[in-house]
Image (cartoon, rainbow, N blue to C red):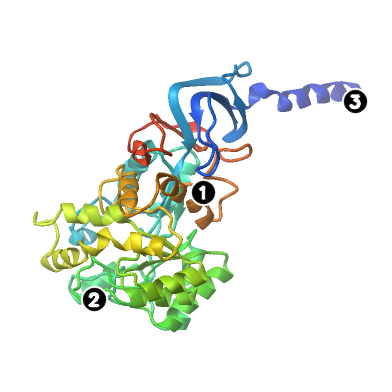
């Protein structure tokens, strides 16, 4: 009996080690951009095993027996793109009253549709910037386990807001506002710290706050700071103590400056950024996520009865400055990473952001970096995503043309792989 067991051990070990048991894909591409700051490669072969890049070799090489072969002649292959500000569980529109008639679970259905559209557009990682309590977390699990076609999701869950501010429920009768509230509004440093801990307890990957007023909320008050300095510092300090970063919706200059001073990690939108606020961001390393497509998306819907009159007035007020503020931020030395606010406009149009960034002074290479290496650093995932290299997640896309010469070719993505899975 003992001898028979010993004889079986080598056979069992051989089965475990056999490459036939691994899921391997061999990709032959005409041109490979491993990172925006690296020289492009010519014809190359990328080998992916169990969701990770194993090698990038010169020339077109045959794969091992049993490997899946993907041939992309004439195509440029590059790292999957990263969008740091999306709302997968919602679609564009001004129907704020839907919060009162649609269950939160419907957001998972909408989100599954939008996750697929986002991945097909070439975005293999997204940061979900605010949703109902479990909708984005459910999508996160679904895409991770391969049950839903979509990108890797870094999810915030419900945003922290002041009572009645942007991100809280407004526009209904008081008793309805209270019923619909997410439970994440807070007043005072102690309560705000508790809400950060609650978000962490319930599954948040990052903390989203609405540091200033907003354009699409149902109130006409201005776009300056909502939280006090002590509240924002409490949020930032508590989140960082838990290993979480903080993203802050912020429009007004003094609100942006206060959020950066408090230790907030990224400023979302940044519309009325001025030089004083920019200096504070540079000093603290605070990153701007400009979401230029959001301003384009809402402007496209003016005058159609989609938004309430108070929201239309706010959209018109920000329309002109939205076409220049990112360029000013770049000139002032503010670090900038890619984010779109998809959900305010149609999902799948995310890459339209590149042309808008270029129109405000970014080079093609800078724009591509903002959605790859720079975005990966914001997520502290620079050793996992944002470039093509052995050991990295197999998040890979293919396009015609050369995005280093014309970044807008990324608006038409031909082939997508997320975590080693091809998105059909």
Whether tag 2 and tag 3 are in contact, CB under 8 A, the answer is: no
Q: Residue at x 37, y 43 (%)?
A: 115
Q: Secondary structure at mark 3?
A: helix
Badge 2 is on which residue? 222
Q: Nearer the viewer, mark 2 or mark 3?
A: 2
Does any portion of residue 203 appear in the rendered image? Answer: no
> Is tag 3's residue or tag 1's residue first in the polypeptide sequence?
3
Element at label 1: helix
Within the image, what quadrant is residue 288 found in?
Answer: bottom left
The residues tagged by marks 2 and 3 sit, at their Cα atoms, a distance apart of 80 Å
The residue singled out by tag 1 in the image is 373
Neighbours of disc 1 within 10 Å: few (<14), some (14-19), many (20+): many
Q: Residue 393 location, x and y as percent? A: 56, 40
> Real-space Cα distance between discs 3 and 1?
55 Å
**Residue closer to the observer: 39 or 337:** 39
Quadrant of the frame with the N terminus:
top right
- 183 sits to left or right of 37: left
Q: Which residue is mark 3?
A: 2
Sort mark 2 into few (<14), some (14-19) or many (20+) by Cα contacts within 10 Å: some
Against 424, residue 252 (above or below) is: below
* Left or right side of 57 for 88: left
Mark 2 residue element: loop
Discs 2, 1 touching: Cβ within 8 Å: no
Left or right: residue 353 compared with residue 398: left
Task: Answer with mark 2 or mark 3, whichever residue precedes in sequence.
Answer: 3
């Amino acid at each position: 009996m003992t001898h028979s067991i010993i004889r079986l051990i080598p056979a069992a070990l051989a089965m475990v080690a056999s490459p036939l048991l691994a899921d391997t894909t061999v990709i032959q591409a005409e041109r490979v951009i491993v990172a925006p700051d690296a020289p492009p490669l010519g014809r190359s072969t990328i080998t992916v095993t169990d969701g990770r890049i194993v090698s990038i070799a010169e020339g077109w090489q045959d794969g091992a027996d049993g490997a899946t072969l993907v041939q992309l002649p004439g195509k440029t292959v590059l790292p999957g793109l990263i969008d740091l500000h999306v709302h997968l569980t919602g679609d564009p529109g001004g129907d704020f009253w839907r919060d009162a008639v649609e269950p939160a679970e419907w957001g998972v259905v909408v989100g599954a549709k939008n996750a697929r559209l986002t991945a097909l557009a070439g975005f293999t990682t997204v940061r979900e910037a605010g949703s109902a309590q479990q909708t984005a977390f459910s999508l996160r699990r679904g895409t991770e386990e391969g049950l839903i076609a979509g990108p890797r999701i870094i999810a915030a869950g419900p945003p922290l807001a002041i009572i009645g501010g942007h991100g809280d429920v407004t526009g209904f009768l008081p008793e309805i506002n209270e019923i619909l509230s997410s439970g994440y509004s807070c007043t005072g440093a102690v309560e705000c710290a508790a809400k950060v801990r609650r978000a962490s307890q319930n599954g948040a990957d990052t903390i989203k706050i609405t540091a200033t007023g907003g354009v699409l909320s149902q109130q006409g008050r201005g776009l300056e700071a909502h939280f006090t300095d002590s509240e924002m510092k409490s949020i930032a300090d508590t989140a960082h103590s838990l290993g979480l970063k903080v993203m802050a919706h912020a429009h007004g200059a003094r609100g942006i400056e206060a959020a950066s001073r408090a230790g907030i990690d990224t400023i979302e939108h940044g519309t009325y950024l001025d030089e004083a606020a920019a200096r504070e961001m540079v000093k603290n390393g605070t990153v701007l996520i400009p979401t230029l497509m959001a301003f384009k998306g809402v402007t496209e819907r003016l005058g159609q009865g989609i938004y309430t009159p108070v929201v239309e007035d706010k959209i018109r007020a920000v329309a002109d400055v939205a076409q220049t503020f990112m360029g000013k931020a770049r000139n002032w030395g503010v670090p900038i990473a890619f984010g779109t606010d998809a959900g305010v406009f149609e999902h799948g149009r995310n890459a339209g952001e590149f042309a808008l960034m270029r129109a405000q002074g970014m080079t093609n290479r800078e724009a591509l970096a903002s959605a790859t290496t720079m975005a990966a650093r914001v997520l502290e995932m620079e050793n996992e995503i944002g470039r093509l290299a052995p050991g990295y997640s197999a998040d890979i896309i293919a396009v015609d043309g050369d995005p280093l010469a014309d970044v807008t070719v990324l608006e038409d993505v031909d082939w997508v792989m997320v975590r080693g899975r091809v998105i059909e």
